[in-house]
Image (tube, rainbow, N blue to C red):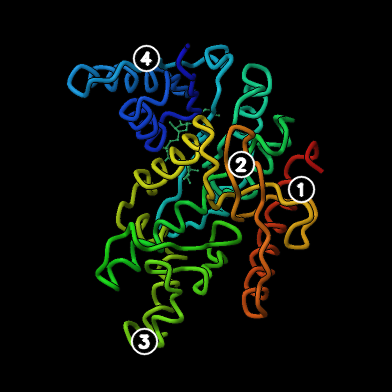
Amino acid sequence: MARPKIALIGAGQIGGTLAHLVAMKELGDVVLFDISEGTPQGKALDIAQSGPSEGFDARMKGANDYADIAGADVCIVTAGVPRKPGMSRDDLLGINLKVMKSVGEGIAKHAPDAFVICITNPLDAMVWALREFSGLPHNKVCGMAGVLDSARFRHFLSLEFNVSMRDVTAFVLGGHGDTMVPLTRYSTVAGIPLPDLVKTGWTTQEKLDAIVQRTRDGGAEIVGLLKTGSAFYAPATSAIEMAEAYLKDQKRVLPCAAHVDGAYGLKGMYVGVPTVIGAGGVEKVIDIKLDRDEQVMFDKSIEAVKGLVEACKGIDSALA
Ligand code: APR
């Protein structure tokens, strides 16, 4: 059987890391696409030359022509610009919206059957726009944010409790931004909810609140340290987890920016929710009942995402 074809649209920091991970995990053959000439070809060659030592057979190709992504099974989109210190994800809206238009048209023409994972920020608005521009089915287009946000939450919690990250689960809802909603009552250490761990005295509510805030600011913390760009190792790893769930029909329960129509009282919008990802793409959106405080936070997050979508419609009348 032929190897799956994985198209990476954008061959920058995240794109290159994605290509390396696809190769190391032998998930398929890679086409790295970018508008910058030489960059995808150089990275593809470099990664391919790690194959003999690493022992993988994945093919790597760099491309500047959308025709090269033809028939891709998965497209992961990182094309666009990342944040610089002092910028919010929302500041990227205008420039990255134009990029989503060309990417959406390229995918529609050459890889209309692909499962598409968007990483470009501001995430919830960009994945919505990418779906609109591409016209692909909603269940085949989603955004990577929740896996990363919950990974950050899990990492900080594992440091606080001094336990393995594997034994920490986290639940994050809402938009990928300052308004994201980490749900502590559904986040656990070995299945024990965080509020119960506060009651036992293993941690305090103040420490938990600080961890929640650090999770919300997780991306900005890294931008502030790197100064020249934003995070790329963990974002790439998170998107690979989603791609693998699709390619191997794993039915993973993963939080992602999915099209929500009915659940959570929402009418057809992209926002971060728990989903099941398998061979059907986003096969299910898991609806849960929020308590009052959570609903207030979620509503705030929804309003922020809606504001960005409206801004997109203001910039490109084709989206209105
Ligand atoms: N088509 C294809 N590629 C493009 C286009 C376009 N229209 N415009 C820009 N690119 C390419 C750039 O040439 C660059 O190689 O996208 C790549 C982006 O790479 P980086 O600048 O290294 O950014 P990266 O860190 O990979 O982040 C990409 O993901 O997390 C988000 O906020 C982040 O929106 C940003 C995106």
Dot 3 or dot 4: first in sequence order is 4
Cα–Cα span, label 4 and label 2: 26 Å
Q: Is mark 2 within 8 Å of ligand 1?
A: no
Residue 34, percent from left and from top: 47, 24
Provide the secondary structure element on which disc 2 rests.
Answer: strand
305 relative position to 119: left or right: right
In this rendering, which labeled residue sits more in front, label 3 or label 2?
Answer: 3
Per the rendering, the mark at residue 314 is 1
Question: In terms of image quadrants, where is residue 287?
Answer: bottom right
Dot 3 or dot 2: first in sequence order is 2
Residue that carries the numbered disc 3 in the rendered image = 200
Disc 4 residue type (three-letter): Arg
Dot 2 or dot 1: first in sequence order is 2
Residue 43, percent from left and from top: 33, 23
Cα–Cα span, label 1 and label 3: 51 Å
Position above or below: 68 against 256: above
Within-10-Å neighbours for mark 2: few <14, some 14–19, many 20+:
many
Q: What is the quadrant of the C terminus in the image?
A: top right
Residue that carries the numbered disc 4 in the rendered image = 59
In this rendering, which labeled residue sits more in front, label 1 or label 4?
Answer: 4
The residue closer to the viewer here, 313 or 192, is 192
Question: In terms of image quadrants, where is residue 14?
Answer: top left
User: Do callouts 2 and 1 mark residues in contact (Cβ within 8 Å)?
Assistant: no
The residue drawn where x is 45% and y is 58% is 150
**Quick one: which residue is furthest to the front in this view?**
191
Within-10-Å neighbours for mark 4: few <14, some 14–19, many 20+:
some
Dot 1 or dot 4: first in sequence order is 4
Position above or below: 20 against 240: above
Disc 1 residue type (three-letter): Gly
Within-10-Å neighbours for mark 1: few <14, some 14–19, many 20+:
few
User: Do callouts 3 and 2 mark residues in contact (Cβ within 8 Å)?
Assistant: no
